[in-house]
Amino acid sequence: MVTIYLRDIDDMIAVNAVWDRWVPRGTAPARVCVEAKLSNCDYLIEIAVVAAR
């Protein structure tokens, strides 16, 4: 599960473009994206990943 926090939800278009190039089609984990106040005012994005083996 991947949670993506964006300072500005309008950046989602760019995030999707990078995601689609990085993750092979059909192998992407569950994902959610929200606009949020981030832990550092200089950050544009924070990503939290939960993985299990």
Image (spheres, rainbow, N blue to C red):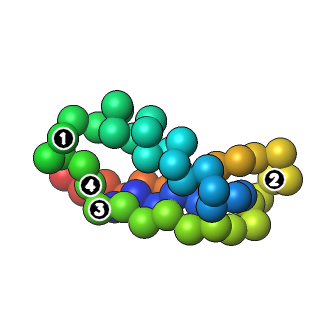
Q: Nearer the viewer, mark 1 or mark 2?
A: 1
Between the C-alphas of marks 4 and 3, the distance is: 4 Å
The residue carrying mark 4 is: 29
Q: Kindly indicate whether the residue at mark 4 contacts the one at mark 1 (C-beta within 8 angstroms).
A: no
Q: Which residue is drawn at 63% across and 61% down?
A: 9
Quarter of the figure with the N terminus: bottom left
Is residue 40 in view? yes
Upstream in sequence: badge 1 or badge 2: 1
Task: Give the quadrant of residue 10.
Answer: bottom right
Q: Kindly indicate whether the residue at mark 3 contacts the one at mark 1 (C-beta within 8 angstroms).
A: no
In percent of width and height, residue 42 lies at 83, 45
In percent of width and height, residue 39 lies at 76, 59
Q: Kindly indicate whether the residue at mark 2 contacts the one at mark 1 (C-beta within 8 angstroms).
A: no
Between the C-alphas of marks 1 and 3, the distance is: 13 Å
Dot 4: within a 10 Å radius of its alpha carbon, few (fewer than 14), some, or many (20 or more) residues? Answer: few
In percent of width and height, residue 43 lies at 75, 47
Q: Residue 40 carries which label?
A: 2
Q: Is mark 4 on a helix, strand or loop?
A: loop
Amino acid carrying label 3: it is Ala
Between the C-alphas of marks 1 and 2, the distance is: 32 Å
Upstream in sequence: badge 4 or badge 2: 4
Dot 3: within a 10 Å radius of its alpha carbon, few (fewer than 14), some, or many (20 or more) residues? Answer: few
The residue carrying mark 3 is: 30
Q: Which mark is residue 25?
A: 1
Q: Which residue is drawn at 44% across and 46% down?
A: 16
